[in-house]
Image (cartoon, helix red, strand yellow):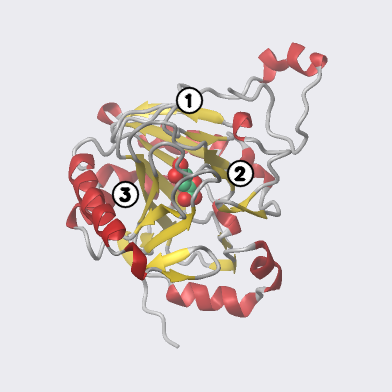
Amino acid sequence: MNPATAPTPSASASASDSASASATASPTAADLSLDAATLDLARAARIYAEHGCVIVRGLHRHTVAAVAVDVQRATDEAYRLADKAVRSEEGWWLGGNLFIPAAPGSARERQLMLVGLGYRRSAAMLRAALEPAACDLAAAILGPDVELMDDGQIVSKEPSGGHAKHMHQDSAYFQHAGLGPAACLTYLIDTDLVNGALHVVPGSHRLGYLPHLDTTSHLGLDPQTWSIERGTPIIGKAGDAIFFHQHCIHGSPSNRSKAARPVCIHRYRAIGDRIVAHATTAANRAHSGADSAAERERAVQRLVVRGFRTMELA
Ligand SMILES: O=C(O)CCC(=O)C(=O)O
C-alpha cells in the first residue's frame, strides 16, 4: 500500500489526515519511473534530487540474463559448501555468501541472504555495473567524477518465506559525508508483491540519518513507525533498476513465491566522498568512532567509471 502522506516519523494517520491526503499524496512508482529507451538524464536526476529515488525501466535489459546465470551458479555453489560457513555477528559467512537464521518454523537452520558474487568473480556483473546509461545517470546525480564503491552485491530471498528486509537506510551501514552512494538495485527476475518487491519512501532522504535497531535482517528502523506498508511498492520486470539515496528509507517483504528472488546492487559515489560512520549492528554503530569509519573507508574498493581521480599523496 502507498503511504497517504509525506514521510514523517509518526505512524498513525487520522481521518482528517486522509481527507487532506489527495493534496499531498506520495508519488506512485509510475511518478518515479522513466524508460531506459528514452532516458532523459536531467529529468531522472531531478526526480532523484526531489524524491531520493528514481526508477529506470529496462536499464539493465541487455545484461540481466547473463548476471542471473552467474547468480544461479554462485548460489548453487554456496548451498553445496554451506557446511563450511563460519559463524559471525551477522550470521554465517562463506566467502562473500552470508547465511542468516531461517524463518521461525522453517525446516532449515539457515537461509541464504547475500550471494558471494561481485565484479572480481563475474564478468557479467562488471559489465552491468559499467552499463553506460547507469554510469551517465550516476554522473548526472553525483557530479562528473564517479567511482564504483566496493564489489557490487547480490541480495537473494529464498523461496517460500525467504527473509523480509526491514525498512532501513543504507547510511546505517555506511554513512557518507556528502551525497553518499547512489545505489542502483536491479531486479534479476520479474518482481511483485508476492516475491518481495522493493518499497521506498519518497522524500525520506531529507530526514537525514535515523537511529536503527537490530532486526532479523540486520539494521532496521523501528517497525512500529516504519512498516513496509508505508513505502511505495515497486513492481517491475527483470532489468528494471531503482536508484536511491543513502538516506532513502527502503525495504522489502518476504518472498512467498516458489522461486528465489535475487537483486543486484551497484553503488556509485562521487570521488572524494567518504564514510563518516559505519556499522553492522546497533551496538557497534553506537560504539564505533571516526577511526573505525576511516578504517572502513580505507577498505573501500574503488573503480573510476566517469571522470578522473587526482593523485593523493600520503
Ligand atoms: O533485497 C532487497 O529487496 C533489498 C536489499 C536492500 O535494501 C539492501 O541490501 O540494502
Name the side, left or right, on which 125 lies relative to 157. left
Residue 38 in percent (x, y) is at 28, 27
Task: Assess disc 2: are there few (<14), some (14-19) or many (≥20) residues with their C-alpha within 10 Å of its C-alpha.
Answer: many
- Amino acid under disc 2: His
Q: Nearer the viewer, residue 255 or 276?
A: 255
Q: Nearer the viewer, mark 2 or mark 1?
A: 1
Query: Residue sitting at 59 percent across and 66 percent down?
Result: 279
**Which residue type carries mark 1?**
Ala
Mark 2 residue element: helix
Query: CB at mark 2 closer than 8 A to ligand 1?
Result: no
3 and 1 marks in contact (CB < 8 Å): no
The residue carrying mark 1 is 29
Percent across and percent down for residue 182 are: 45, 50
Q: Earlier in the sequence, mark 3 or mark 1?
A: 1
Q: Which residue is the extreme one toward the bottom?
A: 314
- Mark 3 → mark 1, Cα distance in angstroms: 22 Å
Residue underneath mark 2: 205
Nearest to the observer: residue 252 or residue 256: 256
Q: CA distance from mark 2 to mark 1?
A: 17 Å
Foreground mark, 3 or 2?
2
Identify the secondary structure beneath mark 1. Answer: loop
Look at mark 3 in the image and give the residue it sits on. Answer: 135
- For marks 2 and 1, the one nearer the N-term is 1
Please report whichever mark, 3 or 2, sits nearer to the chain's N-terminal start: 3
The reply to whether residue 261 is in sight is yes
Task: Classify mark 3: helix, strand or loop.
Answer: helix
Q: Work out how far the residue at label 3 is from the one at label 2, CA to CA, in angstroms.
A: 21 Å
